[in-house]
Every structure is written in C-alpha cells, then in structure tokens.
Image (spheres, rainbow, N blue to C red):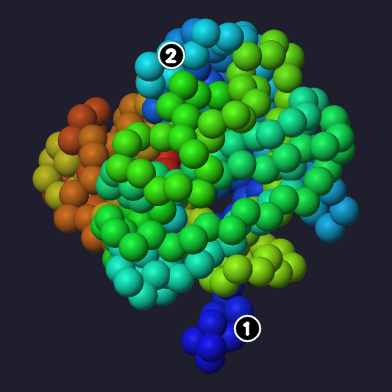
Amino acid sequence: DDSHMASISGRKNMVINGGMRINQRDSGSLTINSGSLQYPCDRFAARGVSSAGVFTIEKVTDSPAGFTNSLKATVTTADSSLTGTDSYRIVQHIEGNNSHYLNWGSSDNQTATLSFKVKSSLTGTFGGVVQNGDYNRFVPFTYTISSADTWEDKTVTIAGDTTGTYQTDTNLAIRLNWSLGTAQLGTAGTYTGSAKNGATGQTQVISTNGATWQVTGVQLELGSVATDFEHRSYGEELALCQRYYQILVDGGADKAIGVGFYWSSNEVDYTHRFVTDMRASPTLEQVIGTDYYRVSANGDSFNGFSGIQYGSTRSCNMYISAYVSGTAGFASDIRSRNAASFIAFTAEL
C-alpha cells in the first residue's frame, strides 16, 4: 500500500549503525561473561547471563564487499552445560519512535524483515529472538550458515505480534537478539510470553572454544521483502547514535570543556548544550583521577565533576563542589588536563 511504499522510499532501516561504522567509545576488544551490556560499537551491545562461558567482542575491518566493518565474537571459555537463564547474545535496542508504524500488539500489526550478513567458523542452524521492550513477548528465529568462514546473506521474516505491549515513544520497543548460546529456547516463528533468548535446534556457539561469529549489514524494515542495505552518510549515522550517547572529552590534556563560573566560593557551574537532542535526560559518565580537570582562571584542579543537574534532552548543568575555591561570579574556561580524562553522556535504552 501507499504507506508501505512511503516508508521504503524514506529512511527504511529501523536499525542504527547497522554497518558498524560508528564507534564513539573506541572500545577495543571487550570481554563478555556475566554482567551488564557492553558496547563494542554504537547501538550494538553484548551480554552474558552466566559466568561459566566467556567471549570477546570487537569491531573489526574484516567485512563483505560494500562494508568496512563488522562485529566479531570469539569464544575464549566454552560453556557446554547451558542451564536455567544462561544466555550469551548480541543485541540492538530499538526506540518506539523508530518502530511505531509496525503496529505490533494490535490487529493492525505489520510484517517486518530482518536482514544481515554473517560469517562463522561453525556451520548449521543458528538462532536469535525478537523481544518487546517489556520483556514479556518473544518470537525466536533461525537462519542457516552453510560454509565456514564465509560471508553469507541472511533474511528473516518476522510476523507482527497481535498482542503484547510495544512502546511507541522514547522508550524501548524492540530488542533484536542474535544468540551465541542459551538454555532458553523456543520454537522459531511462534510468539510466546515465556522468556526466550534463542531458537530450538540452534548451534550453541558458546560451547565451542575458539569459535568465531561475525555480523554486519543489519537492517530491520517494514514488509516481507528484504531490500538493499540502506547506506547512510557518516554524519547522519553519527547523529543518530548521538541521540543515545555522546562524548564531550575523550582523553588528552587541555581539551576544552566549556566556560563556567563560580556559583559560590566553593562551587563552579557550567551549562552544557548537547550536540543533538538526546533520547532522554542523560546520565554522566566520566573518568575520575587526581587533578584530571582544571578551572583555568583560578588554577583550581579537580578530580571530576560532582554531577549534573537541571538536565533535559537538550542541555544540563554540570557542577563542581569539591577541590575548587574562588570568588562568586568569576568566570573561567574549564579544561581536561590528563590523557585519561573522559566525559560522556548516555541515554541508552
């Protein structure tokens, strides 16, 4: 229909950074076992729900024609006894504003198509799952890798869900998961309210020490047909990523932070405007260390910002209430002064 064609002719890909080009954190190789999400590149994360198995995840240049990067997972400690809630996975979380037109959770639900390029040292049937943000609706999927260590194109058709809640605003609507191993297996193509993190019959990559798995060219679009990957400009893709994460200082001495002022004799305030509107009022990430930062005019060195306040999606007030002493009303530039200095804002889903 006309609405379907309008979506395809516009920005059709609900996945951000599907070509793995943007990597603001410059994370290097991350070690994943049990713990919170870690980001090897923007918008893609890895997680393990078990301490038995371990894999590394990193952005690499090995990629198929037309792409410059992929994500590569390598099993460094095998887990061959998956039980309970054990799960190892690569994920992307999709905001409701970017998937609302799927109308999932209603009788007007639309079919979506997930496509990607994958390469693995193993062959066979592999699995993943699409979940809603509330983590109470799950539909597993499978795909087949025929040749080891060879890039292959995969397409998965995802029928719309008739029930459940899928957010249509700034909240988490859809979780895309590629499983590297899990005990929570379900039937491919069948929706359920019981927690699933993979598909019955899938290859458990995490069970083979040294096994590798790579992905790039990820696209989720409206309709039952996979179309060519949407290559956005670098600047556009970066701005889309900065809605969820953006960096103010990334190492180095004498990197400008901004101009602040002494609110009082022992507090310095600085109002920061984000480079693009963020998804939500963000939280502050920073590396703190002795004299990592400086209020230059008064020679006040401080270890890190005390926090942020009066935050919104567009700006926030950063304040320092320790290690500073000056005259109320006096202004000064604020800088980094250590190679390890780091300040970022996160509004990840």
- Residue at 68%, 66% in the rendered image: 226
Mark 2 Cα shell of 10 Å, populated few (<14), some (14-19), many (≥20): few
Q: Which element type, helix, strand or loop, lies under badge 1?
A: helix
- Residue type (three-letter) at the residue carrying disc 2: Thr
- The quarter of the picture where residue 109 lies is bottom left
Can you see residue 241? Answer: yes
Q: In the drawing, does residue 82 fall left or right of residue 238?
A: left
- Residue at 41%, 35% in the rendered image: 196
Quote the CA–CA distance across marks 1 and 2.
Answer: 45 Å
Residue 50 vs residue 296, the one in the foreground: 50
Mark carried by residue 9? 1
- Residue type (three-letter) at the residue carrying disc 1: Ser
Q: In the drawing, does residue 99 fall left or right of residue 31?
A: left
Q: Which element type, helix, strand or loop, lies under badge 2?
A: loop
Residue at numbered disc 2: 83
Q: Looking at the picture, how far across and down is residue 33, in whole percent?
A: 50, 17
Residue 306 vs residue 346, the one in the foreground: 346
Sooner in the amino-acid sequence: mark 1 or mark 2: 1
- The quarter of the picture where residue 127 lies is top right
Mark 1 Cα shell of 10 Å, populated few (<14), some (14-19), many (≥20): few
Residue 33 vs residue 306, the one in the foreground: 33
Q: Looking at the picture, how far across and down is residue 117, in whole percent?
A: 74, 48
